[in-house]
Image: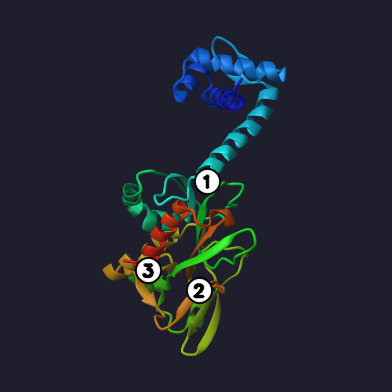
């Protein structure tokens, strides 16, 4: 019995819910898949799949075995792809994690061109504002908006910078007045991104001085797109990245406030970073995606 072939057959049957469906995925005869699973069960001395005329389901032992078998096959595929990912042309699977709004606004429009440039590469782009774990989530490279400190386990590489603007709509300013000094924001509704902690401080740097303002308001959200819509609707003042609101500013839908200051939430730096594991150094797949993001960071238009 070819153990790895049997494992692949078992995993496919478990995921497809039947032998015929698994056989089509594997491009094998159904009888061949049945024989592989039968041989695997016989070698283990246990039933992995409960079979009826209507369905095939995992037994208790099969459910436990499936988790380990699935990971073993994924590790083998990763090992194969890692060794083969040192040629001149990027090829194979690439799993990336990018922030939701940045992925939609900045990277999404360039995905088709990226795939056309690298026809042997398969991209799995996952949009998340969470700090994903590269190992457990099996991510090859993660893009972060903010400074990421390198560690022994993770390589951090700065790809570019961006600016954050304090913005408001004409309607909001007409109804509530225009703040003149940063401290005036204490008397305004500030719609804020949901960072950790209840209190949020906006740090204003300029004119050789630094001012910290504890802002407050009725709306907090972990989506910068929602905050943008709230500003456009006149619900308050927000601190949003240039790549998200530049078009709104140019069209006159939003106004920039405190243009002589650099403004950040708390003391965060406005940088774009890439994180990847040390074993991905030299990966042509990872480097290709990093080059894409780096080019977009240096050309914000």
| Secondary structure type for disc 2 | strand
Q: Quadrant of the C terminus?
A: bottom left
Q: Residue furthest right?
A: 45
**Label 2 to label 1: alpha-carbon separation:** 42 Å
Residue 257: quarter of image: bottom left
x%, y% of residue 97?
A: 49, 52
| Secondary structure type for disc 1 | helix
Dot in front, 2 or 1: 1
Query: To which residue does mark 2 refer?
Result: 264
Dot in front, 3 or 2: 3
Q: Earlier in the sequence, mark 3 or mark 1?
A: 1
Query: To which residue does mark 3 refer?
Result: 298
**Label 3 to label 1: alpha-carbon separation:** 31 Å
Q: What residue is shown at x 47% (from left), y 24% (from top)?
A: 26
Q: What residue is shown at x 46% (from left), y 25% (from top)?
A: 25
Q: Earlier in the sequence, mark 3 or mark 2?
A: 2
Name the one closer to the observer, 110 or 195: 110
């Amino acid at each position: 019995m070819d153990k790895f072939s049997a494992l692949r057959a078992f995993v496919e049957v478990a995921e497809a819910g039947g032998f015929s469906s698994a056989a089509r995925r594997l491009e094998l005869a159904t009888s061949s898949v049945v024989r592989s699973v039968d041989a695997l069960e016989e070698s283990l001395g246990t039933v992995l799949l409960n079979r009826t005329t209507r369905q095939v389901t995992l037994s208790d032992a099969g459910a436990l075995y499936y988790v380990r078998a699935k990971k073993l096959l994924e590790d083998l595929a990763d090992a194969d792809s890692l060794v083969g990912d040192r040629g001149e042309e990027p090829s194979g699977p690439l799993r990336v994690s990018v922030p939701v709004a940045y992925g939609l606004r900045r990277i999404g429009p360039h995905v088709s061109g990226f795939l056309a440039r690298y026809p042997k590469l398969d991209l799995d782009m996952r949009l998340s504002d969470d700090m994903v774990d590269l190992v457990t989530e099996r991510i090859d490279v993660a893009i972060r908006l903010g400074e990421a400190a390198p560690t022994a386990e993770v390589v951090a590489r700065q790809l570019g910078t961006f600016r954050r603007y304090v913005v408001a709509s004409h309607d909001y300013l007409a109804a509530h007045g225009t703040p003149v000094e940063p401290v005036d924001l204490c008397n305004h509704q500030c719609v804020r991104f949901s960072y950790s902690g209840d209190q949020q401080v906006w740090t204003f740097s300029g004119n050789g001085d630094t001012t910290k303002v504890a802002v407050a308001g009725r709306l907090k959200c972990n989506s910068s797109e929602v905050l943008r819509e709230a500003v456009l609707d006149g619900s308050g003042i927000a601190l949003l990245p240039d790549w998200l609101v530049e078009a709104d500013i140019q069209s006159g839908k939003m106004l920039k406030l405190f243009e002589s200051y650099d403004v950040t939430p708390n003391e965060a730096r406005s940088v774009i970073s890439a994180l990847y594991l040390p074993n991905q150094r030299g990966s042509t797949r990872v480097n290709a995606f990093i080059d894409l993001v780096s080019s977009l960071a240096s050309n914000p238009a």
